[in-house]
Amino acid sequence: MESNDNIEQLLKQMYSTEEENIDTSEIIDEEWAKFEAEHFGSKRGNVKREKSPLLKIAAMIIGVLVLSGITYAAIRIVRSNAGGAPSPAAQEVSITDSRQHQDDASYAVQDTTQMKPVVYENAELGTILREMAAYYRCDVVYKNLKARNTRLFFTWDKRQSLDDVVEMFNKFERFNIKQENGKLIVE
């Protein structure tokens, strides 16, 4: 406010020789309009500046939507490759019954995607054994119920026999697994 008063006084002194009662507000408005035109451009430029924040907000929203879509797709791909339910094209084709496969060591014809190792990161023993039991066609019996909730980091190679997998599990100290009559018994 002080600077406006100073400018007004200076203008009054400048024009005081010509007329004593000059309306300085009109002169100030004219000068301000010139200043705006020089430094801020025409009114069309102002309109563009007003739309710019709206365009930025719209671009941010679109960016978030695209990024969330890509993230969702990546999660779906990782989950499908991490040992979820196999697709119909990748399902196992067995020539012999899996119990017979374990007894006489004959191998079933399998798709190569089924033979990749399955990595479990911080998974419960119950989840791991359920998937293995379905693969080896056996049942799981828990005598130690606490062992079911034990979390493990484990890599399962499906080319290994059930005996080899049980032997690997028995290296853990918190539980013991036995294989009897087509059953995995967790103690």
Image: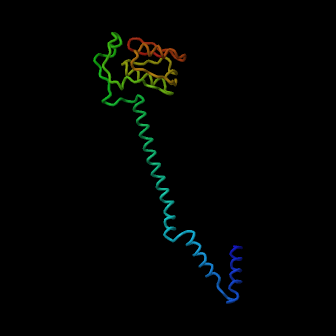
When the figure is inspected, residue 99 is found, relative to residue 155, above or below; the finding is above
Please state the horizontal and vertical placement of residue 140, each as a whole percent of the image.
Answer: 42, 19
Q: Which quadrant is home to the N terminus?
A: bottom right
As drawn, 22 above or below 61: below
Number of labels in the image equals: 0
Left or right: 121, with 139 as reference point: right
What residue do we see at 49% from left, 56% from top? 57
Q: In the visual, does 132 lie left or right of 37?
A: left
In the image shown, does 143 or 179 lie closer to the viewer?
179
Where residue 78 appears, x then y in whole percent? 43, 34
Of the pair 75 and 103, the residue shown nearer to us: 75
State which quadrant residue 4 falls in: bottom right
User: Is 122 rendered above or below residue 59?
Assistant: above
In this rendered view, identify the residue nearer to me: 82 or 180: 82
Name the residue at 40% across, 16% down. 160
104 or 2: nearer the viewer: 2
Is the image coloured rainbow, by chain, by secondary structure, or in one colour? rainbow
Considering only vertical position in the picture, is 158 above or below 21? above
**In the image, farthest residue toward the bottom:** 19
Residue 132 at x, y percent in the picture: 41, 21
